[in-house]
Image: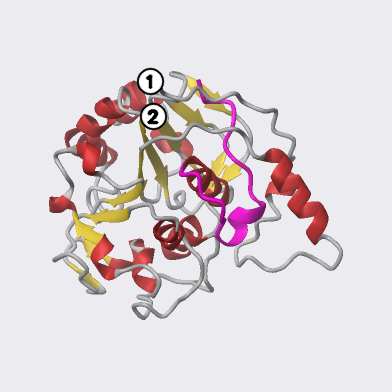
Amino acid sequence: MLRRPHLLVALASAAVLATGCLDSAPPPSGATTATTATATATVAELPRPDHVLVVVLENHAYGQIVGNPDAPYLNGTLKAGGADLTDSHALTHPSEPNYYALFSGSTQGRTDDSCVAVGSLGAPNLGAELLAAGERWASYNESLPNQGSTLCAGGEYAQKHNPWFGFGNVPLDTAHTFAQFPADYSTLPKVGFVIPNLCDDLHDCPVATGDAWLKNNLGGYASWAQSHNSMLVVTFDEDDNGPTNQIPTLLYGQHVTPGSTAGARYTHLDLLRTLEDLAGLTSHAGGAATAGDITGIWN
């Protein structure tokens, strides 16, 4: 029998959520107990999906995607049939630090888009947490030359969008090419990321191109997720370099209320925290430890 979550009231304010700072600095002296207590109080009772896929697209602000007629799949299917976070924000600029924050709860000191030495970091992260808990993790990276390739950049592929390569506690062979994305969706990992190439993620190509890619390549999974205890999340690394860094974030799946919105302010740290809690993890990486779960969208 599928679980039906019972939502709790979110008690945290935006100021509390903002305590999940970029580089996971320790709280001021005397603040640890209060921060931990607040974070515990804000955890919602979430569903436990069998599979969650996260797709990260590039460099577009909320208003450039939501309501855009060039994105009929994102708007007409995923937003209309799922949930829209109307106040979702990236943390910084440029791209790479945001990918690291979404995966590990910290920018890991990244301030540019240069390639990171493979396996040079040992900090906690979503992939390592899942594996330590006995769950499966994988990434599917379009235009990656081959499984586990440590290429920095080539053609439409860019390692700067693939933070897992920076961590020595995430096996290289969990980084798949997108050609290895399974036709049998039941074989997908507990949580996985899909990273389109520099054209299909909207970095180099029009919105219509990325929208069509999503429909053609992940539309089947999204439809399947609706009746197989699973979920698709579509978010963006950052906006178009604007001052508010507001980005689209859409959630779609069996436990998401169709047409729902979540108006509270969320960041990559809150999304990471939600992914960890959806997977039933008891550990939280970096700033996700003091972030809050996404609420108000679960059926």
Separation (CA) of disc 2 from disc 1? 7 Å
Of the pair 207 and 3, the residue shown nearer to us: 3
User: Is 107 situated above or below 221?
Assistant: below
Query: Residue shown at 36%/67% (left/top)?
Result: 170
What is the quadrant of residue 133 in the picture? bottom left
Residue at 49% across / 61% down in the picture?
Answer: 104
Secondary structure under badge 1?
loop
**Of 133 and 114, which appears nearest the observer?**
133
User: Residue 235: horizontal and vertical position, in percent?
Assistant: 41, 43
Look at the numbered disc 2 and give the secondary structure of its residue. strand
**Residue shown at 32%/24% (left/top)?**
226
In the image: residue 136, left or right of residue 109: left
Residue 290 picture location, percent across and down: 67, 53
In the image shown, does 206 or 253 lie closer to the viewer? 253
- From this viewpoint, is residue 102 visible? yes
Main secondary structure found in the magenta portion: loop
- Mark 2 is surrounded, within 10 Å at the Cα level, by few (under 14), some (14 to 19) or many (20 or more) other residues, namely many
- What is the span of residues highlighted in magenta in the rendered image? 279-299
Q: Is residue 170 left or right of residue 274?
A: left
Identify the residue position indicated by label 2 in the image.
252
Find residue 81 and name its label: 1
Disc 2 + disc 1, Cβ < 8 Å: yes
| Amino acid residing under circle 1 | Gly
Identity of the residue drawn at 40% across and 51% down? 59
In the rendered structure, the answer to whether residue 286 lies left or right of residue 135 reads right
- Quarter of the image for residue 72 reads top left
Q: Is residue 14 magenta?
A: no
In this rendering, is residue 280 above or below 261?
below
Asked if the magenta segment contains residue 293, the reply would be yes
Label 1 neighbourhood size at 10 Å, few (<14), some (14-19), many (20+)?
A: many
